[in-house]
Amino acid sequence: MQILGGALSTATATSRARRPANGRRGRGEKRAPKALEALQAKALATIKAAPGKRVEELNRELGVKSGELALPLRKLVASKEIRTTGARRATRYFAASAKKGKKAKKAKSKR
């Protein structure tokens, strides 16, 4: 039985490594980190160019589906590169305001 079990496990492993004929990822298969970074950069540039867009509008502009854009947007929010207002479908995305160096107030000394 161990021999048979070993054959099944190698057959399963090789079938998972194969890509579909259409070149798409299989269900549950991870995207390449470079592809995620590229989509993040595109999304950030789009949000900076036109702040306040919802996910549906970003999808249309970038030519992707909501599911493909969800992770890059979450990563941008987590890294505080963008901020959100609203919830669920009403969520709007804005570029995080860059904190400009505030001038330190000089303490006036009493003489």
Image (cartoon, rainbow, N blue to C red):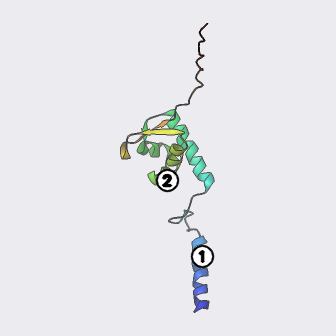
- Residue shown at the point (44%, 39%) measured from the top left: 84
Front in this rendered view, residue 57 or 22: 57
| Image x and y of residue 87, in percent | 37, 44
Q: Is residue 54 above or below residue 32?
A: above
Marks 2 and 1, the one that precedes in the sequence = 1
Disc 2 element: helix
Left or right: residue 4 compared with residue 57: right
Residue kind at label 2, given as amino acid type? Glu
Q: Secondary structure at mark 1?
A: helix
Residue 97 vs residue 93, the one in the foreground: 97
Quarter of the figure with residue 104 = top right
Instruction: Report the residue that reaches farthest toward the front.
Output: 111
Q: Determine the residue positioned at 50% across, 48% down.
A: 74
Locate residue 17 relative to residue 69 in the image: left or right: right
Amino acid found under the numbered disc labelled 1? Ala
Residue at the image position 61 percent from the left and 54 percent from the top? 33
Q: Which residue is mark 1?
A: 13
Eyeballing the image, is 100 above or below 111?
below
Q: Which residue is mark 2?
A: 68
Image quarter where the C terminus lies is: top right
Residue 77: image location, x then y, percent: 50, 43
Crowd rating for badge 2 (residues with CA inside 10 Å; few <14, some 14–19, many 20+): few
Measured in 3D between alpha carbons, the distance from the residue under mark 2 to the one under mark 1, in whole angstroms, is 26 Å
Could you tell me which residue is drawn at 47 percent across and 51 percent down? 70
Position of the N terminus, as image quadrant, is: bottom right
Q: Say how many tags the image has.
A: 2
Q: Is 3 located above or below residue 25 in the figure?
A: below
